[in-house]
């Protein structure tokens, strides 16, 4: 039996047997576009969501329109039918009932008129062929970024932060500010009162949440699991001089989609519902430390085979594919199943599946491996998932194992990269992360493209042409090792470049122009410097890191 919460702990399950109960998705024929016209998206999307889609060229279409509530009411009133969840993207409703009661919906006058097809979780009960979805995306490219200075003492998180080089992004003042993250998980015990999350609460960055399992807006009332608390801590946790998450200034929504008491495909539908809500709220990035392949022995026909981990079979994977098309960036745990392979939605080519390594950067033997079944390289990349530093509900710092933690550690770092590159699409950010991997040219099924270097990902996205488009004095790369370059506005003839150490002592001074804008920094010691760039009409200071 596989557990979707990728923790190395033993959980006691109570299996509830429902005589002849089946789960199925009912697909509907149409949407209430008269009530929610597509040309007026403010009726069903927040302005943040509308702005994000516009910035990245994402089309608002009929999939964004809510499901017809009259149809849902009719299904609720049908004999023996329980409505469990709904999806606007699929225009579908997850229901539960006997096989007979579900099939009767096809002939029931109150439901047959709007019923398109039924897809049973037990595929042997299906009489119609499932249509597979295919996601598409558009790519645009713009760039605008300025740098400042942030100094954290990471303490227990130093290794996992330094491994992916997100600490350099923090120094450059990319700490996730302005990026909205949704965490889909099992439980967030004490997040609303713990000292480790006081920083994001005081900043107004804990935006709320919802428990889709219990249908409860109080996401903290569910005390069945602390998994989400630990996952959130790797991104947003902050204890002065002892612990800093990878995205301490991002904003967060917390959604419970995992039912700790059972293993059932309804959780896939809860997940899709939560992702749809996240999209409507304008979320930029989603972390999923969950995975689906083997279900409870009570539902032997619901589990997926390894061959079905093909990026387009599982309901949750198809939902992830649409989410990507809608502009969301999805980061997900590869899994803790070792050679048994990745689960869904990590099998999607449109998610970043994160494997695990130990503190030395070597493969963690529990981390799920990819295979040729997946349509793209899996895992995509890896981060520390063995002995990861986490914060427990008691506000104490500890360690835990699993890709449940390598995923959010990297997701937080990616949020910082997104802050630095606000006009990059989800596809472009994902590719930058892959290309920064330690074994990008020689990927394998254990580590994928390897351990990413997020500062390198930022630097590699910048070119002389990028800076030439900016109407300001600019520096590239930062951090740097041997040479750095300055973009000089066309109205200027030359710049005087002065380096100061952190105590204000002048170290170096150069005079450059547009034809010779290179500065040799090989003689500088590693550390942080202040660079003053002065021209006839302008002056600008930079915080610079010498590697």
Image: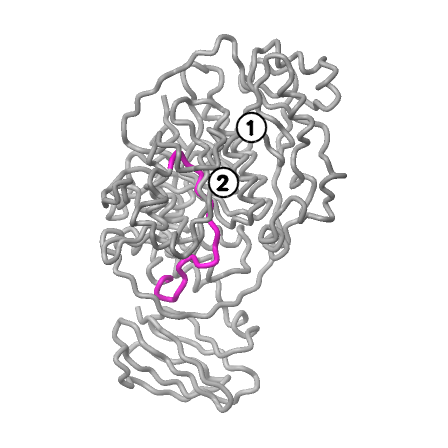
Determine which residue is flagged by label 1: 85
Q: Residue at the spot x=54%, y=24% of the render?
A: 84
The residue lying toward the viewer, choosing from 57 and 382, is: 57
Q: Nearer the viewer, mark 1 or mark 2?
A: 1
Disc tally is 2
Query: Measured along the vertical axis of the image, is residue 207 above or below residue 31?
Result: below
Q: Return the x and y of residue 322 as percentages of the image width and height.
A: 59, 40
Q: Quadrant of residue 161?
A: bottom left
Indicate left or right for 256 with 388 as reference.
right
Local SS, label 2: loop
Distance CA(mark 1)–CA(mark 2)? 30 Å
Q: Return the x and y of residue 495 as percentages of the image width and height.
A: 45, 87
The residue lying toward the viewer, choosing from 7 and 442, is: 7
Quarter holding the C terminus is bottom left
Q: Residues within 10 Å of mark 2 (few under 14, many from 20)?
A: some
Indicate left or right for 144 with 191 as reference.
right
Ranked by sequence position, the earlier of labels 1 and 2 is 1
Determine which residue is flagged by label 2: 376
- Kindly indicate whether the residue at mark 2 contacts the one at mark 1 (C-beta within 8 angstroms): no
Q: Residues within 10 Å of mark 1 (few under 14, many from 20)?
A: many
Q: For the magenta stretch, what is the residue range?
A: 169-187
Q: Return the x and y of residue 88 as percentages of the image width and height.
A: 62, 35
The residue lying toward the viewer, choosing from 300 and 339, is: 300
- Magenta highlight on residue 183: yes
């Amino acid at each position: 039996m596989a557990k979707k919460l990728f923790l190395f702990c033993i959980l006691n399950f109570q299996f509830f047997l429902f005589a002849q109960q089946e789960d199925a998705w009912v697909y509907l024929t149409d949407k209430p576009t008269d009530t929610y016209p597509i040309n007026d998206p403010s009726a069903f999307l927040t302005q943040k969501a509308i702005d994000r889609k516009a910035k990245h060229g994402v089309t608002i279409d009929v999939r964004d329109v809510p499901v017809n509530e009259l149809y849902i009411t009719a299904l609720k009133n049908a004999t023996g039918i329980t409505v469990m969840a709904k999806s606007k993207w699929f225009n579908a409703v997850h229901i539960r009932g006997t096989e007979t009661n579900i099939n009767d919906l096809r002939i029931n006058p109150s439901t047959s008129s709007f019923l398109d097809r039924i897809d049973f979780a037990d595929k042997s009960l299906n009489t119609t062929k499932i249509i597979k979805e295919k996601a598409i995306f558009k790519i645009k490219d713009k760039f605008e970024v300025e740098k400042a200075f942030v100094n954290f003492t990471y303490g227990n998180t130093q290794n996992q932060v330094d491994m992916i080089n997100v600490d350099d992004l923090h120094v450059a003042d990319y700490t996730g500010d302005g990026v909205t993250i949704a965490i889909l998980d099992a439980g967030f015990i004490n997040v609303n009162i713990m000292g480790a999350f006081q920083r994001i609460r005081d900043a107004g960055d804990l935006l709320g949440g919802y428990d889709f399992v219990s249908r409860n807006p109080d996401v903290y009332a569910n005390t069945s699991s602390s998994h989400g608390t630990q996952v959130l801590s790797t991104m947003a946790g902050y204890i002065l001089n002892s612990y800093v998450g990878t995205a301490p200034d991002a904003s967060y929504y917390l959604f419970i989609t995992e039912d700790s008491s059972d293993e059932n495909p309804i959780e896939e539908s809860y997940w899709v519902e939560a992702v749809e809500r996240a999209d409507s709220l304008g979320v930029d990035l989603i972390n999923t430390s969950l995975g689906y392949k083997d279900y409870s022995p009570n539902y032997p026909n619901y589990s997926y085979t390894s061959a079905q981990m093909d990026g387009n079979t599982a309901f949750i994977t198809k939902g992830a594919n649409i989410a990507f098309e809608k502009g969301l960036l999805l980061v997900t745990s590869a899994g803790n199943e070792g050679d048994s392979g990745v689960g869904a939605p990590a099998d999607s080519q449109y998610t970043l599946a994160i494997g695990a390594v130990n503190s030395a950067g070597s493969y963690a033997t529990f981390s799920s491996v990819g295979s040729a079944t997946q349509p793209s390289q899996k895992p995509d990349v890896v981060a520390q998932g063995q002995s990861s530093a986490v914060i427990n509900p008691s506000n104490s710092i500890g360690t835990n194992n699993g890709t449940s933690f390598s995923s959010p550690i990297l997701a937080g770092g990616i949020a910082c990269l997104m802050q630095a590159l606000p006009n990059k699409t989800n596809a472009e950010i994902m590719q930058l992360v892959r290309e920064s991997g330690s074994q990008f040219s020689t990927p394998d099924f254990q580590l994928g493209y390897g351990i990413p270097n997020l500062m390198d990902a930022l630097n590699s996205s910048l070119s002389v042409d990028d800076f030439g488009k900016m109407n300001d004095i600019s520096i590239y790369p930062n951090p740097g090792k041997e040479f750095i370059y300055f973009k000089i506005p066309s109205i200027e003839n030359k710049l005087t470049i002065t380096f100061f150490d952190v105590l204000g002592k002048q170290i170096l001074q150069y005079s450059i122009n547009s034809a010779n804008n290179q500065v040799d920094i090989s003689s500088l010691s590693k550390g942080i410097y202040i660079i003053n760039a002065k021209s006839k009409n302008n002056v600008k200071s930079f915080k610079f890191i010498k590697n």
